[in-house]
Amino acid sequence: SLLVIFLLFGVVFSAMAIIGFQSLIVDDAWEQVTGAVTDVSSHKGQKNTLYAPVVSYEVDGHEYEITSRLSSSVYPTLGGLREVAYNPERPDQAKLIEGTGTKLLFLVFLLIGLAFIFTGPPLFYRSLRRSKTIARLVSTGQKITGVIIDVIRVGRSNKKNLYRNLTILVIIV
């Protein structure tokens, strides 16, 4: 039913956001260092090529590399600086510290997911009530006649008037 689709959509979006946020968490014990984009990893997406920066960083005279887990269609700038968090006990374990744009994207996913989760049940309940009312009116043979008594023009789009807030006077016969 439509409710299941709404809830499933909401759960999927929310789960993607939570997983995304968790992937950004860096252990407080990890150290931070500035690295440089030295290479680019690419792979074919559905419509275009996606690029992920490969960042080199140095710890105690040893050089390490990490490839971002996030890809985009924008080619990274070689030589660009990126912050890297690494495990001081195992400097080869590292994460790129993502900017606010990535966090904002995950926040948008979370908000969309929650909107679907919280609007689905009320809309479904309203639809059920409307269906029951229609079924009751059909079964009793009761006629409803309505007269439009107020229409508000709210603008124009594509050479057509747009209206909203139709007020209907209902007369039960």
Image (cartoon, rainbow, N blue to C red):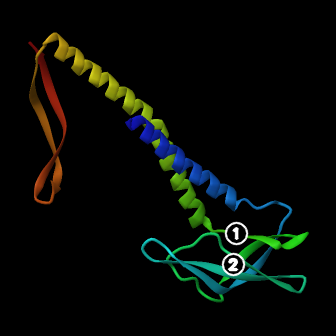
Residue 108, how many percent across, how many down? 51, 55
| Sooner in the amino-acid sequence: mark 1 or mark 2 | 2
Which residue is the extreme one toward the top?
Answer: 140
The residue depicted at 70 percent of the width and 69 percent of the height is 97
Q: Dot 2 corresponds to which residue?
A: 82
Which quadrant: the C terminus?
A: top left
Seen in the picture, residue 79 relative to 28 is either above or below; the reply is below
In this rendered view, identify the residue nearer to me: 101 or 155: 101
- Give neighbour class at mark 2: few <14, some 14-19, many 20+ (Cα, 10 Å): some
Element type at mark 1: loop
Disc 1 vs disc 2: Cβ atoms closer than 8 Å?
yes
Task: Quadrant for residue 96, please give it.
Answer: bottom right
Give how far apart the Cα atoms at labels 1 and 2 are. 7 Å
Q: Dot 1 corresponds to which residue?
A: 97
Residue 35, how many percent across, how many down? 74, 81
The residue depicted at 68 percent of the width and 55 percent of the height is 22
In this rendered view, identify the residue nearer to me: 117 or 1: 1
Element type at mark 2: strand
